[in-house]
Image (cartoon, rainbow, N blue to C red):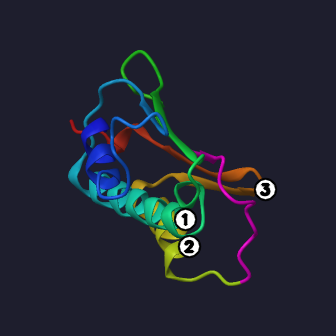
Amino acid sequence: MRELIEFQLAPFIDLSSPRLEIRGPEVSLAADASQAIGLALHELATNAVKYGALSASQGRISVSWSVDQPTGAGGLKLDWRERGGPLVIYPKNKGFGHIVIKNMIEQAARGSVELDFAKEGLRWSLQAPASIFLQ
């Protein structure tokens, strides 16, 4: 998971920057889940550069995940949080990016996505079942 996140964010931010926090346990994802999550992370990062936390010098991104213990039988919780960027405005139109970070990822990961366009920063969360893990 960490490698996937770092790969997707490296074009947008120095991975050693204090503006970026990545944390979570070691976990391996199935190929289809990695592809879908990678697309969603890329879209989130692109939007952060254009409109969100990475468009402001004080903006910060936190990406964290947890696995239900003891063996991930309950699944994965992945969170993307932005803060310190411009005030977030709820988008009037839902374009391709919204489809990628919500509908497509829900279908591919067989999970649910929560999107919160909070004024202080975008919040995106994925809750997916254990079937997304590499067996």
Residue placed most toward the observer, 119 or 108: 119
Which quadrant, please, contains the C terminus? top left
Residue at image location 58% in from the left, 54% down from the top: 53
How much space separates mark 3 and mark 2, taking CA atoms?
Answer: 18 Å
Which of label 3 and label 1 is nearer to you?
A: 3
Can you tell which mark lies on residue 130?
none
Disc 3, disc 1: CB below 8 Å?
A: no
Disc 1, disc 2: CB below 8 Å?
A: yes
How much space separates mark 1 and mark 2, taking CA atoms?
Answer: 6 Å
**Secondary structure found at label 1:** helix
Which residue is the site of mark 1?
A: 102
Amino acid under disc 1: Lys
Residue 134 vertical position relative to residue 59 in the rendered view, above or below: above
Q: Reading the chain from its start, which is encountered first: label 3 or label 1? A: 1
Which residue is the site of mark 2?
A: 98
Q: Is residue 5 left or right of residue 127?
A: left
Which residue is the site of mark 3?
A: 119
Disc 2 packing (10 Å; few <14; some 14–19; many ≥20): some
Residue 37 at x, y percent in the picture: 37, 55
Residue at image location 75% in from the left, 50% down from the top: 120
Residue placed most toward the observer, 94 or 16: 16
Q: Is residue 9 visible?
A: yes
Residue stretch rendered in magenta on the structure:
79-92
What kind of secondary structure does the magenta stretch mostly adopt? loop
